[in-house]
Amino acid sequence: MRFSGWSTALLALLAGALFGPLMAWRRFGPLDFWWGMSLSVGALVFLSCAADKSQRSALLQDWKNGLAGKIGLGILSALVLYGVFWVGNEVSRAVLPAAAKDIAAVYGFKQDAAILRIGLLIIFVIGPGEEFFWRGFLQRRWQKRLGLFSGWLLAAGFYALVHVPSENPMLVLSALVCGLY
């Protein structure tokens, strides 16, 4: 299938349709949040590759060239982002004491899932898949169409928007920070 603006729009809408209910109900049918998130991200990566040959090529290039460096950069980025959120957590609790409830609710996404399973899914499926779909597919295309700055803002804003059904302002703000990062 040849890439078009319509395929980008349809996949963006599909992302909203998948992630919105997942954020609201923390389930994906019979699956808990973590399996549901992994399945959704995997489906979006697969569909983005099916919609655009250059997306497939980019994924294959990532596997072939400099994978160790990219993994290292991903780990470093995750550590920096962890630091940003640690500071944000402390500042939010100090400035907005009511935010503590919303911050604690984010950890409710854990449910009864084992920490090891959550960690493995985040490291091997969710983290790379979200980067590949949100930045590699949506943001890249929106930047080509709208310009670097506008495409970046639209992608970050849309990433935050799909978190709105969680009804958790701190999670939405965190998603916006991640999208802008």
Image (spheres, rainbow, N blue to C red):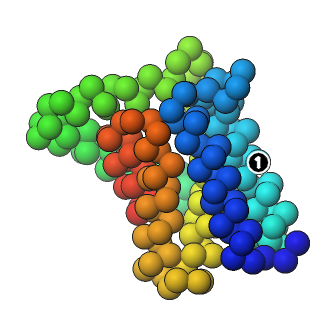
SS at mark 1 in the image: helix
In the image, is residue 162 above or below residue 118?
below
Q: Is residue 60 visible?
A: no
Q: Work out whether residue 61 or residue 159 is closer to the camera in this orientation and state it.
A: 159
Query: Residue 56: x and y, percent?
Result: 81, 67
Q: Residue at x 51, y 23 (%)?
A: 110
Quadrant of the drawing holding the N terminus: bottom right
Q: Residue at x 59, y 18 (%)?
A: 114
In the image, is residue 59 above or below residue 80?
below
Residue lying farthest to the top in this orientation? 112
Query: Residue 178: x and y, percent?
Result: 43, 54
Q: Residue at x 31, y 31 (%)?
A: 102
Q: Is residue 130 visible?
A: yes
Check disc 1 and report the residue beneath it. 43
Residue lying farthest to the right in this orientation? 1
Tag 1: amino acid: Ala
Query: Residue 6: x and y, percent?
Result: 72, 72
Circle 1 packing at 10 Å, graded few (<14), some (14-19), many (20+), is some
